[in-house]
Amino acid sequence: MEAEALIVKYIDILSESMRQSTRKYKEEANGGELFNLTITQLHYLHAINEMDGPTFKQLVEKFNVQKSTVTDIVNRLIKRNMVYKQQSEEDLRVFHLYLAEKGKELLAIESMGYYHFACRMTKCLADDETRQFTELLRKIVTDIDK
């Protein structure tokens, strides 16, 4: 089997294992609410968190979608108390979006689920292998978007 085919096979196995691991962690942490989010809503939560107060227009540009799409998704997140909007002091026509406490909590639960998965993944490695694995991942991540 060629290297790429093996890599695909292992990525599939790791992906399924990560889903199971994070699902288990979320259930234990009472993060079941995450299961009720669509992947798109989760992407929006991450974007709002990373962009620190983006406007609707900035989300339109980031996701390359219609403003009505952004408005619909954001309104659903607002309804679920995951996001709130705040009117700009400079331009009253503009609203900035922020994570509400519930949104922050859900992203923290998700992050801890990933952390627990990383621990499971590296528990069979010696310290030097973990460092080597981490360096290889850094190299891949750095080069993948070029």
Image (spheres, grey):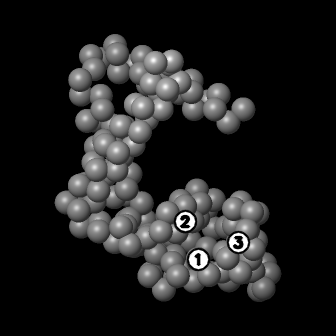
Q: Is residue 47 left or right of residue 21?
A: right
Up/down of 102 relative to 137, above or below: below
Give the crowd class for mark 3: few <14, some 14-19, many >=20 residues within 10 Å: many
Q: Is residue 146 visible?
A: yes
Q: Earlier in the sequence, mark 1 or mark 2?
A: 2
Residue receiving disc 3? 55
Give the crowd class for mark 1: few <14, some 14-19, many >=20 residues within 10 Å: some
Quarter occupied by residue 92: bottom right
Q: How far from the left and from the top, in percent, is residue 101?
A: 41, 72
Q: Nearer the viewer, residue 17 or 131?
A: 17
Q: Nearer the viewer, residue 26 or 84?
A: 26
Q: Quadrant of the C terminus?
A: top right
Residue receiving disc 1? 73
Label 1–label 2 contact, CB within 8 A: yes
**Residue type at the position of mark 1:** Ile
Distance of mark 3 from mark 2, alpha carbons?
17 Å
Q: Is residue 106 left or right of residue 77?
A: left
Number of on-image labels: 3
Which residue is located at x 74 percent, y 63 percent? 64
Local SS, label 2: helix
**Residue type at the position of mark 2:** Thr
Q: Earlier in the sequence, mark 3 or mark 2?
A: 2
Residue 40 — which label? 2
